[in-house]
Amino acid sequence: MFPSETRMLIILPRELVDRARVLAGRATTSMRLPVSLQIILRALIEEGLKRPTDAGLLANVNRQAETVRRIRREAHRRPTAARAGHGPARRSRSGARS
């Protein structure tokens, strides 16, 4: 699709994805063209990168970085035995939960 592209997996809060879907729906209606969630996310990233010194953008980045730091710190403080039961469910190659 693009001369140089990279694929990535991104984990987003459901509320954020829902808001992006609403925007995609509005764009589809107003432009009378199919606008996917991927197009919306790509446009938002591109526009955000055009404003690297925007105070609102930097505040959002700071808030997210602090949240990740807090979550990692709390996870690190938990005893090892307590952590074992809280991890994601492992799946075998057949897809059945263990």
Image (cartoon, rainbow, N blue to C red):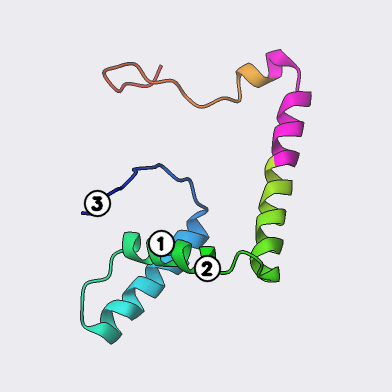
How far across and how far down the image is residue 76, in percent?
74, 25
Classify the position of the N terminus by image quarter.
bottom left
Nearer-the-camera pick, 59 or 5:
5
Residue shown at 45%/64% (left/top)?
Answer: 46
Q: Earlier in the sequence, mark 1 or mark 2?
A: 1
Discs 1/2, front: 2
The amino acid marked with disc number 2 is: Lys
Real-space CA distance between mark 3 and mark 2, rounded to the nearest whole angstrom: 21 Å
What SS does tag 3 mark? Answer: loop
Residue shown at 70%/38% (left/top)?
Answer: 71
Q: Is residue 14 magenta?
A: no
**Quarter-wise, where is residue 70 in the image?**
top right
Q: Which region shows up in magenta?
A: 69-82
Principal secondary structure, stretch drawn in magenta: helix
Q: Is residue 77 magenta?
A: yes
**Quarter-wise, where is residue 30 in the image?**
bottom left
Real-space CA distance between mark 1 and mark 3, rounded to the nearest whole angstrom: 19 Å
The amino acid marked with disc number 3 is: Pro
What SS does tag 1 mark? Answer: helix
Within 10 Å of disc 2 (Cα), the crowding (few <14, some 14-19, many 20+) is: few
Residue shown at 21%/72% (left/top)?
Answer: 34
Task: Tell whether label 2 touches label 1 (CB within 8 Å).
Answer: no
How far across and how far down the image is residue 19, in percent?
46, 68
Task: Tell whether label 3 touches label 1 (CB within 8 Å).
Answer: no
Residue that carries the numbered disc 1 in the rendered image: 41
Residue that carries the numbered disc 2 in the rendered image: 50
33 shown above or below 18: below
Nearer-the-camera pick, 91 or 43:
43
Nearer-the-camera pick, 5 or 75:
5
52 shown above or below 30: above
Residue that carries the numbered disc 3 in the rendered image: 3
Within 10 Å of disc 1 (Cα), the crowding (few <14, some 14-19, many 20+) is: some
